[in-house]
Amino acid sequence: MPKLITTRTRIADLGKPRVIVIGGGFGGLEVIKGMNGAKAQVVLFDKYNHHTFQPLLYQVATSGLETNTIVAPFRKLFSRQNDFYFRLGEVKNIRPEENFIETSIGGVKYDYLVIATGAVTNFYGLTEVEKHAAYMKNIVDATKLRNKIIRQLEYALLTEEEEVMNSLMDFVIVGGGPTGVELAGALTELKKNVFPKDYKELDMREMDIHLVEASPRLLNGMSEQASQKALDFLNEMGVKVHLNTAVKSYDGYEVNLSSGEKLISRTLIWAAGIKGNPISGFKPDVITRGNRLLVDEFSRVKGYDNIFAIGDVALMEGDEKFPKGHPQMAPPAQQQGRLVAKNIRNLISGSPLKPFRYFDKGSMATVGRNKAVVDMGKIRFQGFFAWYVWMFVHLMAIVGWKNRVFTFFSWMWSYLTYDRSNRLIIGRNEEKFSPEETKPH
Amino acid sequence: MPKLITTRTRIADLGKPRVIVIGGGFGGLEVIKGMNGAKAQVVLFDKYNHHTFQPLLYQVATSGLETNTIVAPFRKLFSRQNDFYFRLGEVKNIRPEENFIETSIGGVKYDYLVIATGAVTNFYGLTEVEKHAAYMKNIVDATKLRNKIIRQLEYALLTEEEEVMNSLMDFVIVGGGPTGVELAGALTELKKNVFPKDYKELDMREMDIHLVEASPRLLNGMSEQASQKALDFLNEMGVKVHLNTAVKSYDGYEVNLSSGEKLISRTLIWAAGIKGNPISGFKPDVITRGNRLLVDEFSRVKGYDNIFAIGDVALMEGDEKFPKGHPQMAPPAQQQGRLVAKNIRNLISGSPLKPFRYFDKGSMATVGRNKAVVDMGKIRFQGFFAWYVWMFVHLMAIVGWKNRVFTFFSWMWSYLTYDRSNRLIIGRNEEKFSPEETKPH
């Protein structure tokens, strides 16, 4: 018997079908936009009052962009959409048999439900690593990581012991996907262009950036050509790339690698994987690999008529090209979001449902100034032009015109001045450091 | 016997006189700039790694500006100044007899010391108010207040009980100085231009903004004419101004006023006063009214040869026009900072010290769009032109060109669109709300 919900969401009954969307990420936003003008009430539940542009979180963590340019408040985004309601709250449980959801601010009934709750960081059971690693799924995480990176350099000023200094000035990034590669590149640029001016007392040659990838190549989802070029770029920039290497343990200080090598660092950034973030209440057999919800070709959760799941949290069976599910990136989520909006309209009007067809737009990653790799079907290019394409595509994808303009100015400013945004430590020191100790307690 | 300091600041000994500046506010920055090129080592200690432009904190709290536009990292500001050192740390105690300071990161000796630690919020002993009130002295405070304001509206959606609704939608600002007046104005503009679009489910006529001032007029430091016009502006905008009224108590819900009136609000913002924030270690008789350090006409702490205090934390005796000390605003701090840099240079070179002459540039406050009041000596004006002057002066005063450009764009954007910046709740809910209860627990 689930706990009684005593607070009230107070969502008006419009006498129209109610569509509840859980999560305002890339997919959720497309569902809401797609429902504009439909004869339905659309309610968005999210733990935050804003959308976060996750692909650029790494720039916030490395002082490249400010938090505000990559977020957009939901109420502003949809202020002109009729019959749209937003509720700031966390959905705790679903009761499919009652068409009811339990949330942190009360319970409410739905006619159609869309699970767009995305993914969370996956530590694959390495609980000790989880405890000590930094990671980025939202702007609080990214800001904490920024604080941490800059604080380590402030602390490095206070010690003369070589090992302690190294533990503060060396950074270990785990996971050679786009996030890991982009973080490694951004840290290298801080090391090269910003920190030498900010920390004249430190010898920046002491700062090592390690990138650890378990598989034989970086950017596994991209072409061999892109992987190789990204590796070349990173090698050129001085990043120490460890391929075919996994992290065995990390206690906040010592990183033990599967190769037997040991690295010393107080900053290990985990970008090695994600897992679906479904909500409880489903039959257990719909939770499939990667903790994702099994959905049919219409993006409906298997065995439920009026519940859809999209994006990172969904795994669609039946697409031959993607037997393990579509890649957990923005485009599949957005395309599924648009499809689900259409299919809910079809259900309301009694029309047949449409199946999903994934249009693969390709993928890209940036390594640094004038250095990026782009795969667009058979068309593959790297370097200066790829970097421009990367910037343009991300700029256009950022939600909100003001954010776009500010991001453009920030990037131009950094490009021209070789400087970075305000490298701030917001708030007081959370982690204490004492140069007398070697390992942190 | 003070606690032994075991960590090390590791500040290099340059064989030159060492000037330690505590606090990088308006005054501290001027000391450092003024020491540029002098035969001295300058060390700045600050709890934060950035300067904060405090006069615009209220805009951060009301979603007018983003945090990053009003802060500037010290290392970046002084990256080209030779013999400048920054240390992120809090100074805990001074031992004047040993020319030594104790800090959170270790102890260090100085030849000259400048106390520029500013002020903290003064609750005048009202501990219950202190516990429940919001206030703004740094960007964390301002961000928390922004979170709180927006969260109250999210919560207001969840209740139907009139008193609970009012407690969430009504805001009480205490203190009719520039900060209180500017906050009241900014909240009114949110109520008028932003919240009606964001919160269509709420009746915005229910939102009351109270401004409580103990004295007979607003903007006490300015001319009668400015006070009257500010009051007219606020009345016009619908702010409920309570003059000659003090807050007697506040328990997080009920505000009891000296007039006998009772207001209900979960958001009381305290802008009613500040007090000096000196550091321990001085003879008790140098701590004078307002918790400020008594300084002579050279800005030296009374009875000490090589210790200066400037700005909000200093009270200079001997200026006939300001028998109670100079106003606790940026200009006196900046002017004293410049003077102290000169006087330290004079001490080093064996020249005579120069006394302080305060140049009163006047003062100004903004109430809202096209509404501001300016006093410049005998020249007084209000309204549209005053508003432009206010914007121009503040824009020029913001530290850093990039911040200036971004602030300008933000203001232009808001002016043209009537919209505000990203009204974000950063992080998860800190305060729980349940519509069943009346008073918060």
Image (cartoon, coloured by chain):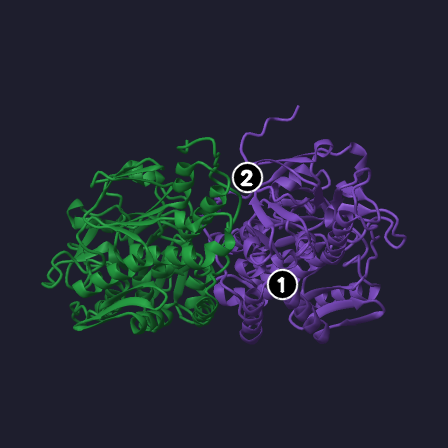
Chain colours: A purple, B green
Q: Is residue A414 left or right of residue B254?
A: right
Q: Which mark is residue B347?
A: none
| Residue of label 2 | A10
Q: Residue at x 57, y 53 (%)?
A: A74
Q: Quadrant of residue A18?
A: top right
Quarter placement of the C terminus of chain B: top left
Give how far apart the Cα atoms at labels 1 and 2 are. Answer: 32 Å
| Residue of label 1 | A398
First of labels 1, 2 by sequence position: 2
Q: Residue at x 54, y 35 (%)?
A: A8
- The amino acid type, in three-letter code, at marker 2 is Arg
- Helix, strand or loop at mark 2: loop
Quarter placement of the N terminus of chain B: top left
The mark lying in front, picked from 1 and 2, is: 2
Q: Which class describes the residues within 10 Å of circle 1: few (<14), some (14-19), or many (20+)?
A: many
Q: Is residue B161 left or right of residue B384?
A: right
- Helix, strand or loop at mark 1: loop
Q: Quadrant of residue A69?
A: bottom right
Query: Between A165 and A41, which is closer to the camera in this rendering?
Result: A41
